[in-house]
């Protein structure tokens, strides 16, 4: 049986040459600002994107970026439209899809079991 290869033993891909990005892009305009023609990995998340360690997709994106990949995030896409999923173009490697951090019950109801009317992180 072959042993697992340590995560940080792979050869870095992109960020090793150009450094890490100040933010992970969520639009084509932000990709142009960074000088990227495409993303290697695109994360599709059911939550809003906040570049903070308490948000799982930001952590995963930054870990992949530290390995040298160009990572973009599509937060809360409109699932009824394919244009929302094509906002960053086609990734060079793959799409990563996550439902998000918050459980649907927490997202929908308050602690008093009343319907929640807002999401503090959704624009």
Image: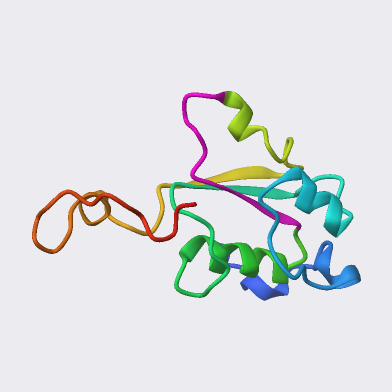
Dividing the picture into quarters, in which one does residue 111 lie?
bottom left
Against 12, residue 96 (above or below) is above
Q: Residue at x 53, y 73 (%)?
A: 52
- Residue 78's x, y, as percent? 49, 33
- Residue 101's x, y, as percent? 38, 59
Residue reaching furthest to the left: 112
Q: Residue at x 54, y 24 (%)?
A: 81
- 60 or 31, which is in the foreground? 31
- Residue 105's x, y, as percent? 20, 51
Q: Which residues are magenta?
A: 70-81
Left or right, 96 with respect to 26, comes to left
Q: How many labels, in total?
A: 0
Q: Residue at x 63, y 69 (%)?
A: 63
Dividing the picture into quarters, in which one does residue 34 lie?
bottom right
Against 53, residue 70 (above or below) is above
Left or right, 23 with respect to 1, comes to right
Against 84, residue 9 (above or below) is below
Task: Indicate whether residue 78 is drawn in magenta.
Answer: yes
- 2 or 49, which is in the foreground? 49
- Its colouring scheme is rainbow
């Amino acid at each position: 049986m072959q042993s697992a290869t340590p995560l940080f033993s792979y050869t870095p891909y992109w960020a090793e040459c150009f450094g890490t990005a100040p933010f992970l892009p969520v639009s084509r305009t932000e990709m142009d600002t960074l000088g990227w023609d495409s993303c290697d990995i695109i994360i599709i998340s059911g939550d809003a994107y906040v570049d903070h360690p308490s948000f799982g997709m930001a952590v995963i994106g930054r870990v992949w970026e530290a390995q040298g990949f160009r990572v973009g995030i599509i937060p809360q896409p409109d699932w009824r439209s394919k244009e929302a999923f094509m906002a960053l173009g086609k990734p060079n490697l793959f799409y990563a899809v996550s439902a998000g951090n918050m459980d649907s019950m927490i997202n929908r109801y308050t602690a008093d079991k009343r319907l929640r009317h807002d999401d503090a992180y959704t624009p």
